[in-house]
Amino acid sequence: ALTSIALSFATNAAFADSSACDPGERVVKFSHVTGGTTHPKVVAANNFAARVNKEMNGKLCVEVFPNSTLFGDSKELEALLLGDVQLLAPSLSKFGSYTPKYGVFDLPFIFKNMDQAIRFTNSPQGKDLLYAMKDNVGFVGLGYWMSGMKYFSANKKLILPSDAKGLKFRVQTSDVAKAMIKAMGASPQAMAFSEVYGALQTGVVDGQENTWSNIYTKKFYEVQDSITQTDHQLLAYLFMTSQDFLDSLSPADRKQFLQIADEVTQEANQSVKAKEAENRANILKAGGKINTLTPEQRQIWVETMKPVWKKFQNDIGENLINAAANS
Ligand code: LMR
């Protein structure tokens, strides 16, 4: 019974976001884990579905399943491998089992802001990384969707990294994130996104790190003392499919599909800063507390985390790290 409730919820969510599919149209499932209406990934996924469903009407029909309603973090990449879903947009911090290269996006303080990250993803090295998993698993990146810079929150006020000593932080499945939390003298616990609110509420973990959009749409501010504006890492997504799916389209359809993917990606990255600012304001309006740092305090976070880079230099590759850092 539980399964059928979950499935019917997922189906309703999908049809609320895209038009119902017509007979003869090929259904293309797009699963992701974020929710709300103001989240940049939610908006971009729905825009992509709306455009394909209008412009490729009669051929393809994209159904969006947000909020981990179809597959959560732990299952979605496997589902893509099996062909049970055709489109995903996981955070770049969730690919450790498939490639070490995306660790570059996780290095603390490598990007000063999203503009630098966008410049890197538009560079030849950044574009090459879209295909880092093509030969080993057949995953293909269609584009990078920025989500925002990340901030720490905890059940106590964090001003310096030493305030986090002994606390437990939920992280994504990223070895770089784990090393970063350890550098603060805290302990990392990898956990699926859908479980974070409950874990913060019950004290399974003390804190987490995320963007304004995730903290607002998942209401993490309700179960944390405050959020500290550290800007310590980037959160960005790989909008992705499988080579099998692309190969199954006719050359003309594939061209049109990739063109729409490219345009939706550019549009999403142009509006992401405004969405983050809107969700930061939404947190404050809803009663969440935000701590800002002086340049001197922030510098202590930078110095505490810098040793993490060395640990991953060989796995990621020094050229790639330099290219990202100097973009
Ligand atoms: C997280 O797990 O914290 C994020 O990757 C969720 C998301 O997709 O924004």
Image (cartoon, helix red, strand yellow):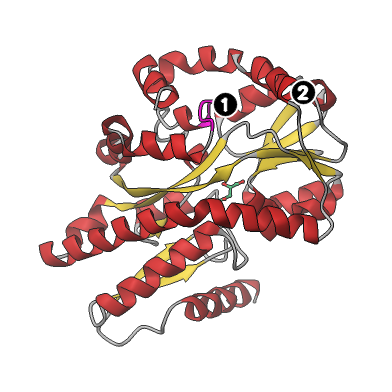
Q: For mark 2, does the 10 Å Cα neighbourhood hold few (<14), some (14 to 19), or many (20 or more) residues? A: many
Looking at the picture, tell me which residue is in the foreground, 190 or 197: 197
On the image, the x and y values in percent for residue 71 come to 52, 59
**Residue positioned 88% across, 37% down in the render:** 156
Q: Is residue 27 visible?
A: no
Instruction: Say whether residue 107 is magenta.
Output: yes
* Residue beneath the point at 24% across and 54% down: 244
Location of residue 296 by image quarter: top right
Name which residue type carries label 2.
Pro
Relative to 145, is 124 above or below?
A: above
Q: Which residues are magenta?
A: 106-112
Residues at circles 2 and 1 in contact by the CB criterion of under 8 Å: no
Task: Give the amino acid at mark 1.
Answer: Phe
Q: Is residue 171 magenta?
A: no
Residue 24 is marked as: none
Residue ranking furthest to the front: 295
Determine the residue positioned at 52% across, 65% down.
Answer: 70
Q: How many marks?
A: 2
Q: Which of 267 and 55 lies nearest the eye of the viewer?
A: 267
Local secondary structure at mark 2: helix
> Could you tell whether 184 is left or right of 163 in the image?
left
Q: Position of residue 178 (x, y in %)?
A: 63, 27
Quarter where residue 120 is shown:
top left
State which quarter of the image contains the N terminus. Answer: bottom right
Residue named by callout 1: 109
Above or below — where is 14 with respect to 235? below
Majority secondary structure of magenta residues: loop
Quadrant, the C terminus: top left
Q: Which residue matches tag 2?
A: 161
Can residue 306 be seen here? The reply is: yes
Measure the C-alpha gap from mark 2 to mark 1.
Answer: 14 Å
